[in-house]
Amino acid sequence: MAVDMESTWLRRYVTQAPPRLRLLCLPHAGGSAAFFHPWGHAFGDDVEVLAARYPGRQERIADPFVTAMEPLADVITDELRPFLDAPLAIFGHSMGASLAYEITLRLQARYGVEPVALLVSGRRPPHLLSPRPELTTDDEVVAEVRRLGGTDSAVLDHPDLRELVLPAIRADFGIVAGYPARPGLPMPCPVTAYVGDRDVDADVEAVRGWEELAPNGFDLCVLPGDHFYLIEQRAPLIADIRTRLAPGR
């Protein structure tokens, strides 16, 4: 019987031939799969990109939000099962980096699968996370988005768009606030950490802390920019990831 390779939770950028490798991309708080659309076919004809589609936004606007990191990691891990016929690398930015860590643990525990690479961006490792206050008003949420920068900041200038995107941002900020520091567990694969040199949310030395969870190899890549350095630095970031995903690495 054919395996169903479609998923409500994952947007696929299908390769013409069976993929040599898949790259799972996990958006930031308030983000969507569309953030990674420019990445869809950026890694060669043999790398299939999967972008996580969180509920409550875009084509899933009517779906109820997930309100905690652990159940979000649970469901995405389960959704990945049909896609584990090829090696998997995982990239996550900001909230998505913590989610990538949690998914990596679950893949190993549930299916005995070890990603070939964990790529974390703009986020402290789990054992170095700082407490995050829960934001209770729309003004507080908007102020935090503006502090971090990124495309969502501009969207909030338009009242109609603001009303559309604010619930998802608020829900995801709740996930981040509800995910406190915990003892970090060693990753079963090499870890690469990316960070902007002017990131106000995760400074370079804090992000370097992922090395303590990387007994199988660690690299730190610092690029110019703030918390959303990966927008302006998309080309060099993609080029670096492409090199790391190349055959023989």
Image: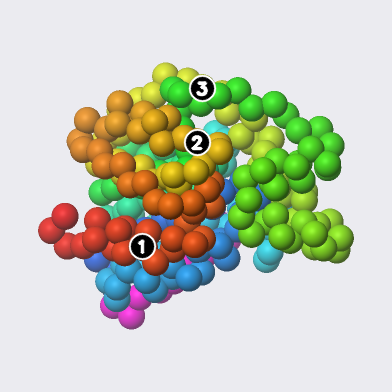
| Quarter of the view holding residue 60 | bottom right
Label 3: which secondary element = loop
Element on which disc 2 rests? loop
Residue 100 is marked as none
Furthest toward the right, the residue is: 159
Dominant SS of magenta comes to loop
**Tag on residue 202?**
2
Above or below 173: residue 16 = below
Magenta region includes residue 186: no
Q: Which residue is mark 1?
A: 236
**Magenta region:** 5-17
Quadrant in the picture for residue 148 = top right
The residue under label 3 is 181
Which of 44/85 is in front?
44
Q: Quadrant of the N terminus?
A: bottom left
**Quick one: label 3 or label 1, which is nearer the N terminus?**
3
Residue positioned 77% across, 51% down in the render: 166
User: Looking at the picture, which amino acid does disc 1 mark?
Assistant: Pro
Amino acid carrying mark 3 in the image: Ala
Q: CA distance from mark 2 to mark 1?
A: 20 Å
- Quadrant where the C terminus is found in the figure: bottom left
